[in-house]
Amino acid sequence: MKSYRKRKKRSDDQLSQLQLQCELAIQAPGGVSKVLHLIEGASDDDIKLLNEAQYSPLVGCIFRLGKNTTRNGNSTQSQLELDELIEVCYRRNLSVHSGATFGECFHRPIIVAAYYGYYSAVRLLLQQGALPDLRDGDGKNVFYAAFQNPTGRNTLRECDKQVADTLWDMGAVTCDLGEWRKMNQGQLGCLCYSNFGSAAGGSSPHRSVMYQSLNNKCLQTMKFMVEKGSVITDEDFVRITKCKLLKRFLSMVACMESPTSLHKPSQVTTQIFQRMKSWNKDIDWSFPPTWKVAITLCRNCGLPEDIFRNNVVPFLSRDWFYTKEQLQRPVVQKWNL
């Protein structure tokens, strides 16, 4: 997973004429339409200079359109306008891996499109060959950005959900660590792993989407991730324990599993909360891998399988088999895969 850190911003005298014209057009009224005409009319040499500079006008245009995004998503007009510009850039052979620097941070078109909920743009860029697990200057990939919208972290808009569905439908993300390892041996950045934080392979502070859904109290995102097959990892669980978020986590698990369709963790009764501490197959995703490995290792402890499974396993808490030191020491995210 290639990670792009902050890049030094070029001065105006270092920009190609076409890049300077695009950046000025983006700020003007009707900016996206003006950029489209500039790209259509540019010479092959001008396009070559943009690719050499790893610059794409798509980033600025998406930021411009994204200013009007709301909790209900984006207008049909802005989506069509953006899709048309993406098609023109592709026809003119502008690299889908290029981007632009804003706020001293390098941004990629597919990541910014995912952030603002432009799901049709994300689909187009993937079809054109954009690699989903390439990072921006902040360490985010397209999968992580899909769950970080500008209207509020504790919500999952329909357009954000469609971005995430698009990534899964097009094979850009997997819950299978073995598949992720195998695919990235062939071509770096071609597949996202849903259980990693966006810092995988780097030192960015971003956590996994599952953990972020807990931290942001977004029940919709947690439910979506579980339905797709994601789980709580050891990294997530240790951080949940260390940050004293276990009660909130169990309450959110209860909201997802309760037949009464609870909508807020505050509605969870003590009886339901206590039940979430015990294992059952419906909430197996909420038990970390170390717990499951320990259960497997202890199958031959001398008890009959049915007695062990029915009378012992449900009473083994999630932190069983972790040492006190593991649960209390600072969490340092390292990915040596």
Image: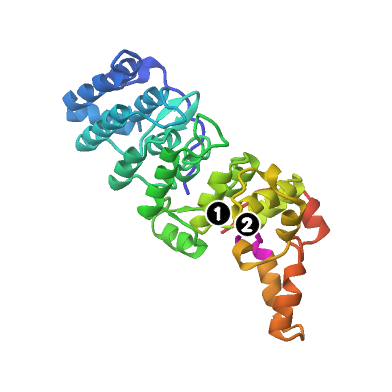
Most frequent secondary structure within the magenta stretch: helix
Residue extending farthest front: 260
The residue that mark 2 highlights is 233
Q: Amino acid at mark 1?
A: Asn
The residue that mark 1 highlights is 195
Query: How far is the residue under mark 2 from the one under mark 1?
Result: 7 Å
- First in sequence: mark 2 or mark 1? 1
The answer to whether 151 appears left or right of 236 in the picture is: left
* Residue at x 52% of width, y 39% of height: 139
The answer to whether 310 appears left or right of 19 in the picture is: right
Q: Position of residue 8 (x, y in %)?
A: 48, 26
Contact (CB < 8 A) between labels 2 and 1?
Answer: yes
Q: Position of residue 169 (x, y in %)?
A: 36, 53
Query: Over which residues does the magenta segment extend?
Result: 285-290
Give neighbour class at mark 2: few <14, some 14-19, many 20+ (Cα, 10 Å). many
Q: Is residue 56 visible?
A: no
Residue 106 badge:
none
Residue extending farthest top: 28
Q: Is residue 286 magenta?
A: yes
